[in-house]
Amino acid sequence: MDIDRDVDLAGLLVGAEYRRGIVISSPKLRKVYERVERIAPFNVTVLIQGESGTGKELVASELHRLGPNPRGPFVALNCATLIGQLAESQLFGHVRGAFTDARENSLGYFRAAQGGTLFLDEIGELPLGLQPKILRAVENHEIQAVGSYESFLVDLRLVAATNRNLRSMVTAGTFREDLFHRLNAVSV
């Protein structure tokens, strides 16, 4: 145990603000939470940017809690965990018989978040082939389950987060510019 470090940490907590288990001690973090409080009531798509471990999911959770549908579900998905060929089904659901192991209908993350907030963490990891489908969902609030001809309207708030520089990814051709602009309606 480093006594000097402990003293410094204790000194940082003087004058700190506590919100739902979050210690807000720096002026930059206070500005982040002031911004969250200002934009939360509006049902707009929000892009949260920051390094790994900076609390992006906590910010998304606060946007949900203070937002227009706090009683609805808060559904979080780390896009880095999407599984290749199953990714579309994971996001948008599927109908029975759509593929070999599709023994029953599945809602997918978008429909599971109906009436609440869908938090897409690590959006920069989203495969390029899925990006047009996410774009359609963001623009039209409409999705289509794998194997279905029927479209579903989804009423949810979309919050995305990344630790990557999406502007650089757009320039490199690994992230769609139109999707970036739709996700970046408001940024934190």
Image: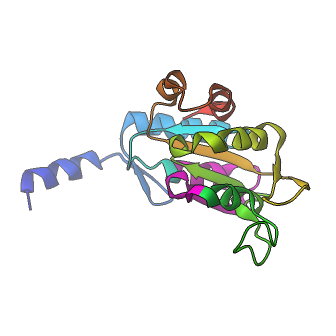
Locate residue 107 relative to residue 74 in the image: left or right: right
Locate residue 15 relative to residue 67 in the image: left or right: left
Task: Give coordinates of residue 165: x percent, y percent.
Answer: 46, 30
Task: Give coordinates of residue 167: x percent, y percent.
Answer: 51, 25
Looking at the image, which residue is at 51% across and 52% down? Answer: 57
Locate residue 134 relative to residue 36 in the image: left or right: right
Looking at the image, which residue is at 51% across and 31% down? Answer: 166
> Which residues make up the magenta segment?
59-84
Q: Which residue lies furthest to the bottom in this view?
A: 103
Task: Give coordinates of residue 158: x percent, y percent.
Answer: 69, 46
Please determine whether, in this image, residue 68 is positioned above or below residue 163: below
Q: Can residue 41 be seen in this view?
A: no
Task: Give coordinates of residue 137: x percent, y percent.
Answer: 77, 44
Locate residue 157 relative to residue 25 in the image: left or right: right
Please determine whether, in this image, residue 15 is positioned above or below residue 19: above
Q: Is residue 162 visible?
A: yes
Q: Residue furthest front?
A: 100
Q: Residue furthest top?
A: 171
